[in-house]
Image (cartoon, grey):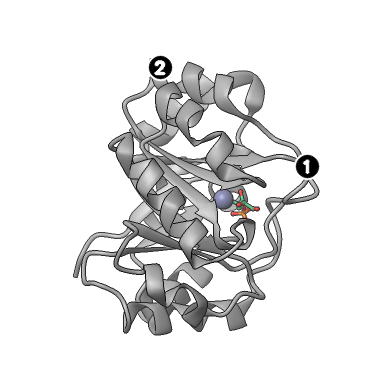
Amino acid sequence: MKDIIISPSILSADFANLEKEICLIKEAGAKWVHVDVMDGHFVPNITIGIPVVKSLRKVTDLILDTHLMIDNPEKYIESFAKAGSDILTFHFEACKDISHAKNIISFIKSFDKKAGISIKPTTKADEIFPILDKVDLVLVMTVEPGFGGQEFMHDCAMKIPIIKNNAPDNLIIQVDGGINNLTSKVCTSLGANSLVAGSYIFSNNDYKKAIQTLS
Ligand code: DX5
Ligand code: ZN
């Protein structure tokens, strides 16, 4: 069985000690760190942005897995790429249509970065079929994006096998929202190979143990 990529979401970390938190999750075995960017428009919350990615890039070699929950993602992609994001995942719902999404994917790739597309709970899996061979990662949201600590929506996980059955073998299928030691198993048994977890990891006083219980 292939390894499951765990991407701890720093949304639930101690923002006053981000460098320390990132060192701790690295020591705990994480290879990726999930950076949730929210603009107060696409989602009803505001979090962090380009300067934070730039600062994190200086202190870590972990893969910066950047989840853009923003309107007009194309306006900010160059800045995030130059700040040091490794993966740029934007929302399908922030695009006008498929061709707009394709242009954004090409733009991300022009900076030699990995491109991801994310779908909210109400978006059907088949809407992104035409771009499954263009992206490196699909992010299936299992909560309404905007906040950490929400409850996993089981119905959304049923999109995982639909995507897997219609995607190239090397596609990373990531799940985000309400992931814990139980819901992680639901997702991996359905075909997910990357899990984002915020509150489950950072509310545990042993990050290593928490990460180990996810895969
Ligand atoms: C929610 C974010 C998530 C969030 C997950 O909009 O995209 O990455 O941090 O938090 P938990 O794991 O607590 O559901
Ligand atoms: Zn996220």
Question: What's the residue at 42%, 35% (across, down)?
Answer: 25
Question: What's the residue at 43%, 77% (across, down)?
Answer: 160
Is residue 12 visible in the rendered structure shown here? no
- Would you call the spot at circle 2 few (<14 residues within 10 Å), some (14-19), or many (20 or more)? few
Note whether 210 is above or below 118 in the view shown. above
Closest to the observer: 29 or 125? 125
What secondary structure is marked by label 1? loop
Amino acid type, callout 2: Val
Identify residue for label 2. Answer: 59
Q: Quadrant of residue 170?
A: bottom left
Question: What's the residue at 58%, 77% (across, down)?
Answer: 156
Question: What's the residue at 32%, 81% (across, down)?
Answer: 166
Residue 213 placement, left or right of 73: left
Residue 199 placement, left or right of 3: right
The N terminus - image quarter: bottom left
Q: Quick check: is the Cβ at mark 2 less than 8 Å away from ligand 1?
A: no
The mark that comes first in sequence, 1 or 2, is: 1
Is residue 155 visible in the rendered structure shown here? yes
Amino acid type, callout 1: Gly
Identify residue for label 1. Answer: 40
Closest to the observer: 11 or 180? 11
The percent coordinates of residue 162 (x first, y second) are: 41, 84
Note whether 69 is above or below 110 in the view shown. below
- Would you call the spot at circle 1 few (<14 residues within 10 Å), some (14-19), or many (20 or more)? some
Are circles 1 and 2 on residues that touch, CB within 8 Å?
no
The percent coordinates of residue 189 (x first, y second) are: 37, 79
What secondary structure is marked by label 2? helix
